[in-house]
Image (cartoon, rainbow, N blue to C red):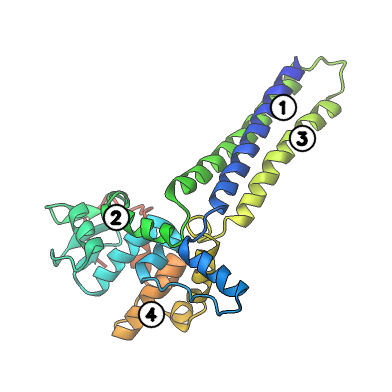
Amino acid sequence: MWVLFLLVAWVAAVASAARLCHAAATAGRTHGPASTAAGADGDREGRRPAPPPRISIYEAAFLAGGPRRVADLTLLSMSRQRRLLLAHTGWATVVDPEGRDDLERSVITAIGPGGQSRVPAIRAALAAADAVRTLADRLVAAGLAVPPPAVTNIATAVRQAQYAGLLVLLTGAAALFVLPPEESSGPVAAWFALPLVLVTGCLAIAHVEIRPGSLWASPAGQRMLGRIAATPAARTGNGDRDGAGDAAAGLTAFAVRGPAALDDPALRAALSGDNSSGSGHPCQWE
């Protein structure tokens, strides 16, 4: 009987590992069209390779954290300009209903005619907005971003591997439970340890390889993020300062590093999406 449980465990482990490897390989085949080819031709012919494309702060945010980071950066930028109020309870209130670009107009549309909305709802609406899709398509075409379907496949494959690991543990426990008393449990446990090692090994590799930014950014995009992160603005920028130069540096730091770049606990709470006091009144400002 325990062999049947072992068969189920192996099928789940092998299938999830194969799915995760296939998803990672598919995402890793993302290359820039013209820019990559031009750089390779330049190397072969002795010419200097083409310079890397310049990207906006919103494009850097997408490479570092996907649509969520773009939405949070837009909210933070509007908040810095006093055109939107962010509450520590996780509510956003429009002050200036005139957006200055497509992303800001998408945020205002997501908030709705009432002028107030929860930050998670704004993120979800902005992720489906044309402005973010256009930004993502531009980065994918430049070879800097992983296509969104590939990102979804990786996330799904990781979840399946986690479920497979849990299934291996459950089937192993069931096998030991139905094992006749006269049989030793050591060899049975060893057999179930093999698929468990396979699944946990794949998850460990995925955890190491899928670093911050690497889920959305292609290898070329990761190199560009590394160059941006090495700039003084990204290293020392503080999103809580008031000067124009400091504010720009703070936005750059937030685009690359996320909430870790914020010193203001109220802003971090507003953008955390996990506010314990989020059920409070949206006008409870700090």
- The crowd level at tag 1 (other Cα within 10 Å; few <14, some 14-19, many 20+) is many
Q: Position of residue 108 (x, y in %)?
A: 19, 58
Quadrant location of residue 10? Answer: top right
Give whichever of discs 2 and 3 has the lower sequence position.
2
Q: Which residue is mark 3?
A: 193
Q: Which residue is mark 2?
A: 119
| C-alpha separation, residue under disc 2 versus residue under disc 1 | 43 Å
Give whichever of discs 2 and 1 has the lower sequence position.
2
Quadrant location of residue 109? Answer: bottom left
Horizontal placement of 178 versus 12: left or right? right
Q: Which residue is mark 4?
A: 249
Q: Position of residue 164 (x, y in %)?
A: 62, 33
Disc 4 vs disc 3: Cβ atoms closer than 8 Å? no
**Residue placed at 36% from the left, 52% from the top?**
276
Quarter occupied by the C terminus:
bottom left
Whether residue 127 can be seen here:
yes
Instruction: Name the kind of residue labelled 4 in the image.
Output: Ala
Q: Position of residue 71 (x, y in %)?
A: 32, 59
